[in-house]
Structure formats: structure tokens, C-alpha cells
Image (cartoon, grey):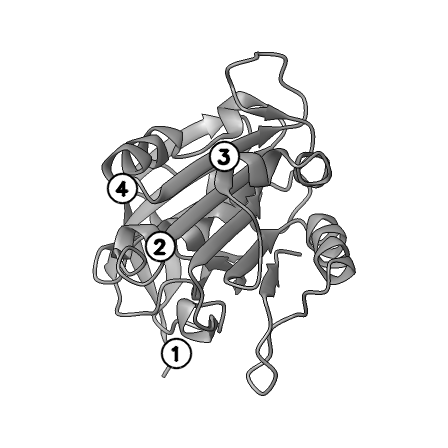
């Protein structure tokens, strides 16, 4: 029996052209950081792709989606509205979770674009606050409207003093929108550590989103003597590539 079911869309937020969050009726028990397959039926077959849940476990599933104009699936997903149906796989998958993070005092959650999704799930689940002394959310986008869920993250930073929310914008020209440039530029200039605190042997970094950002940041961490985390060889960073 297939584990994919039809679920009604109960919420839709358009952050900018080509960037939305959708919430479906279906709930699920999963580990924050895991993903689900979303799909639509086209020409008699189901087209599906994997998307990280942005919601906390037990809440209606939410996903942060970026449109690929020539893609086989996302244009169809973007055409859906509240009360429309979308196919959702009931089985969560993936190991990009806090269970895989070794003991650390400072957790860095670094994302580009929709790579923010699994971090939203971790934050919403409330599983971070007692485990880590500091949590830094770094979100890199092109322009300010693409800072999805920014009000929620700002509110969390006010509520939990150990949280630092650091937007990084590569195209914006507003001085108060966030750091300017790419995440790698802000890292090289020392701006991220100036705001969030030093990345040291008591730190662990999760990287999610654009594979080029992940490759570039991994190289920078490795150059400073940090190694990718493996179960048999604990390290200081791990990643999830989005394409």
C-alpha cells in the first residue's frame, strides 16, 4: 500500500515571487530536520520531490518552497491555493537532525533560501534551548522579501536571549536589512563571528541549501582545522544539499 495521501492545503504565504510556504492538514510524528515527499498527479503518474518539513512534530505539516520555472513539479505546486489538494508521503526520511549533532555549546544553523526549512522545524519543536548555550541562525538570500519567516525568527530572538538571527543579503542596498554580501563574504570578514560569537572547538555548524555555499563554507571550516562530522569520527560541521 502506498504511503502517499492527499492532504488539503490550509495555509499559503507568498514571501516573494517564486517563494512560498504552504501548510497542509496532515500531521506527522517525525524528527525535526527530516523531509517528506510532496507530489501532484500529472498525465496519470505521480510526480514527487523531497522537501524538509518546516513545522514542528505533531503540527500541520508546513513546507518552504522555491519555484523552479521549468521544473516538473514546483510550477504545479505554486498554482495550488488554500483548499486545494496536494499529495504528501506519510513517511519522514533523512538524518539531518539534532540526533546527529555531537555535544556542543554553540550551534550554528546556516542556510541559503529554502534551506531555512529544517531549522524552523528545530526551533518550533523547542528542542534547542536546553541543549545549547548559544544558537545562531544565519540566513542568506538575495533580497529582503526572501527572508521568509523573518518576523517569527526576530520574535524568537527576543524571547530567547541565547538565539542570534543573522540575515545576509547579496543584493539589497538597505543598511538595516542585514549583512551585505554572501555568507562566505560575511564569514571571511569576521562579521558572522562578530555578531554570533567565535566558532571554536565547542561549536557545531549545520549547513543547508545551495551546494556551492556548502562547498565553500566546508572548505573554510576545513582550512581552520575543523572536520565534517561522522558517526564514527565526530566533527564540527555537517550539511544537507538541496539539489
Please tell me whether mark 2 or mark 4 is closer to you in this view: 2
* Corner quadrant of residue 151: top left
In the image shown, does 12 or 98 lie closer to the viewer?
98
**Mark pair 2, 3: CA separation:** 17 Å
Please tell me whether mark 1 or mark 3 is closer to you in this view: 3
Element marked by disc 1: loop
Please tell me whether mark 2 or mark 3 is closer to you in this view: 2
**Mark pair 2, 1: CA separation:** 42 Å
Taking the spot 69% from the left edge, 28% from the top edge, the residue there is: 181
Circle 3 sits on which residue?
166
**Mark pair 2, 4: CA separation:** 11 Å
The answer to whether residue 107 of the structure is visible from this angle is yes
Q: In this view, does 147 lie to the left or right of 8?
A: right
**Mark pair 1, 4: CA separation:** 42 Å
Q: Earlier in the sequence, mark 1 or mark 4?
A: 1
Q: Which of marks 1 and 3 is nearer the N terminus?
A: 1
The x and y percentages for residue 221 are: 70, 57
Element marked by disc 3: strand
Q: Residue 2 carries which label?
A: 1
Q: In this view, does 123 lie to the left or right of 96?
A: left
Circle 2 sits on which residue?
133
Please tell me whether mark 1 or mark 4 is closer to you in this view: 4
Element marked by disc 2: loop
**Mark pair 3, 4: CA separation:** 15 Å
The x and y percentages for residue 71 are: 65, 47
In this view, 50 is above or below 4: above
Q: Quadrant of the N terminus?
A: bottom left
Q: Earlier in the sequence, mark 2 or mark 3?
A: 2
Amino acid at each position: 500500500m502506498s504511503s502517499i495521501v492527499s492532504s488539503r492545503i490550509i495555509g499559503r504565504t507568498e514571501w516573494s515571487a517564486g517563494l512560498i510556504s504552504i501548510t497542509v492538514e496532515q500531521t506527522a510524528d517525525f524528527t525535526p530536520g527530516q523531509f517528506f515527499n510532496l507530489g501532484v498527479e500529472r498525465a496519470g503518474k505521480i510526480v514527487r520531490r523531497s522537501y524538509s518539513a518546516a513545522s514542528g512534530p505533531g503540527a500541520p505539516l508546513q513546507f518552504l518552497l522555491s519555484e523552479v520555472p521549468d521544473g516538473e513539479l514546483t510550477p504545479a505546486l505554486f498554482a495550488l491555493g488554500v483548499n486545494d489538494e496536494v499529495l504528501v508521503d506519510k513517511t519522514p526520511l533523512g538524518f539531518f537532525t539534532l540526533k546527529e549533532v555531537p555535544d556542543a555549546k554553540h550551534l550554528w544553523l546556516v542556510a541559503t533560501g529554502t534551506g531555512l526549512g529544517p531549522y524552523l522545524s528545530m526551533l518550533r519543536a523547542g528542542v534547542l534551548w536546553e541543549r545549547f548555550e548559544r544558537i545562531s541562525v544565519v540566513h542568506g538570500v538575495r533580497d529582503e522579501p526572501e527572508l521568509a519567516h523573518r518576523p517569527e525568527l526576530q520574535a524568537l530572538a527576543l524571547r530567547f536571549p541565547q538565539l542570534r538571527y543573522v540575515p545576509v543579503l547579496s543584493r539589497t542596498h538597505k543598511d538595516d536589512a542585514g549583512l551585505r554580501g554572501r555568507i562566505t563574504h560575511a564569514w571571511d570578514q569576521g562579521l558572522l563571528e562578530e555578531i554570533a560569537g567565535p566558532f571554536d572547538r565547542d561549536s557545531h555548524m549545520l549547513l543547508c541549501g545551495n551546494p556551492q555555499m556548502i562547498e565553500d563554507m566546508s572548505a573554510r571550516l576545513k582550512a581552520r582545522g575543523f572536520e565534517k562530522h561522522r558517526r564514527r569520527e565526530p566533527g564540527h560541521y555537517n550539511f544537507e544539499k538541496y539539489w
